[in-house]
Image (spheres, grey):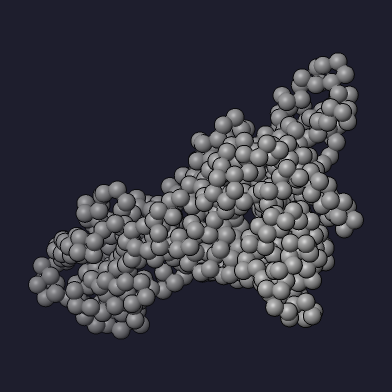
Amino acid sequence: MSSAAILEPGVFRRYASDQLVTLAKLVLENAFQPIVEVGTGSVFGYESLLRGQERIGFSSPLELLDQAQEVGQLLLLEQMMANRALAKFASLPDFSSATLFLNLDVRLIHQGQHFIEKVVQHLRKANIAPSSVCFEFSERFDNTSVPEFAELVTWMRKEGFKLAIDDFGVGHGEMKLLCDYPVDYLKIDRHFVAGVDRNPRKRHLVKNIVNIAHVLGIRVIAEGIETEAEFLACREYGVDLVQGWFIARPTTFVSELQPAFPHLADIGRGRRSSQSLDEILIRKQIEHLPAVYENESIDSVFELFRRNPRQAFFPVLNANGEPRGVINEYHLKEYIYQPFGRDLLKNKVYERSISHFVDRAPVIGLDAEAEELMSLFANMDNSACIILTENMRYAGVVSAASLIKVINEKQLKIAQDQNPLTGLPGNRAIRDFMQESGRDDDETRFFCYCDFDNFKPFNDHYGFHMGDHAISLFAALMKRYFFSDGVFLGHVGGDDFFIGVRDWTREELNEILERLLSDFHDDVAELYSPEERIAGKIRGHDRYGAERDFPLLRCSIGVLELPQGLLLDDLGRIGAEIAAVKANAKDSEGGLVFAAFGETK
């Protein structure tokens, strides 16, 4: 440690007015905190954070920056820290595919062009693309009230930098920024992330913020993730990127940074298939349009439209392959049909690049549900497509016509999954319902697994036609007693059924299930001969071929309760709990057993 670092903080503070930046050079460091892709656990980028201010007597970075502003050294201090952050970033082995997030103090906006020019010079020396740098505008201050702000944003865009709204939801003018400026990322403030898994109001806010951002083609970052439950909730609500202590704490040591946290992709998911039905269908309809890069010449766009005369738009990407939006042909027609129009576009005085013609378009990951894409189409304005990404990079586009095909094919697949005997949805629909319900913790949910006891000897003795009759009888009783909204009925196969309900009480469900079982037992007894009905048993062979007596057919129901506030995305764990409570129900006298998640034995 340097000698400066061991002196009393008060001594530094006393001389800070004249020598603040000089002292800061001795003790301040850049800490990097990873920003991670929710779906894969891969590191997307790093936020640079100031550390070491306590060594010169400041309790927080904000206090240090306030002092620097007061003594007229804020620009020098921020320039020094930005240069150090870029140098550290350039030392990373994966820096060319990552993004560095830098905070831009609102008080520097009126000097912003000078600040950015210095950053650009450093980037050129370090061979870092401007699109690898994202400047964060904190909404704790009203950036849009600064007269030079709009001009600075335009200039930063022209240089190729990315922009983010920091501290979204707790400051000034965030909606103005969303509406009026081309923002790439929106960082939801920690206030809304803390306890989001337990707070219904926060859940609704986060869901709607994500939806609004995606319609505008903006990716969402959740800040301050500190628990697994918060991570799972943000993933469920469509957040694209996360950062926080649950993933990794900020570190000043480059050696401690890792390129990925692959375990995050599997948390709460269990052993799941690699692709959902929606993703499979969407991949079949995706259109892999060629894209243009915003830093290319305008001639490249003219050439692309010339080679594809039937195409009215093309996606626009930054140098990192992330979507910026689309460029529409009609924007260029006034130049195409104007005398010297193309020459005007290439005139350096006129300064019109590809970025000037980019229109926003909804952007969402390939793993989204088809209904979510349809919702984006319903809410967007004047956009011909949705841009799809995989691992945050451009993967293709889907049009409204293609999405209709996806929805129709999904409905057909669901219809094909229905059981031909009962007309009830099959295993795929049951899994989808369980997964959707497990993720929606706003209310209590019950999963009821219904399984006949002694069905094989009955089926063997009376024939499969009578067995089918018993199955159809139970399905009809299910439909009679469970018909309200929010109820799901499924046929697992054979003599196994599934009932899913939400927002019922245990007492209400218990009463209906007891009536269902009672009616089924009475009705199915009529399928036996009078002699066997009176005896209460039939003679048959067990699964090992041994002949013995079997009681009359009955149904056992094991009910798994997922209490309100429990968010679960692991079908493997849910299935294991259902199997346990079903076994308990089969061993019970009445054939009906309830158990809350985690209480099965």
Image position, residue 257 (x, y; %): 72, 71
Q: Position of residue 568 (x, y in %)?
A: 44, 65
The residue under the point 55% across, 64% down is 225
- The residue under the point 78% across, 35% down is 354
In the rendered structure, the answer to whether residue 341 lies left or right of residue 213 reads: right
Closest to the observer, 67 or 165: 67
Give the position of the C terminus as an image quadrant: bottom left
Identify the image quadrant of residue 18: bottom right
Establish if 317 lies above or below 203.
Answer: above
342 lies above or below 268:
above
At horizontal 73% and vertical 32% (from top left) the residue drawn is 357
Q: Residue furthest front?
A: 14
Residue 278 lies left or right of residue 497; in this view the side is right
Q: Position of residue 543 (x, y in %)?
A: 35, 79
Q: How many marks?
A: 0
- Residue that appears at 57% across and 70% down: 246
Foreground residue among 151 and 59: 59
In this view, 509 is above or below 423: below
Report whether residue 454 is seen. Answer: no
Q: Is residue 402 above or below residue 544?
A: above
Residue nearest the viewer, comparing 35 with 350: 350
- Say which of 546 and 266 sits in front: 266
Residue 113: name its quadrant: top right
> Which quarter of the rendered picture does the N terminus lie within?
bottom right
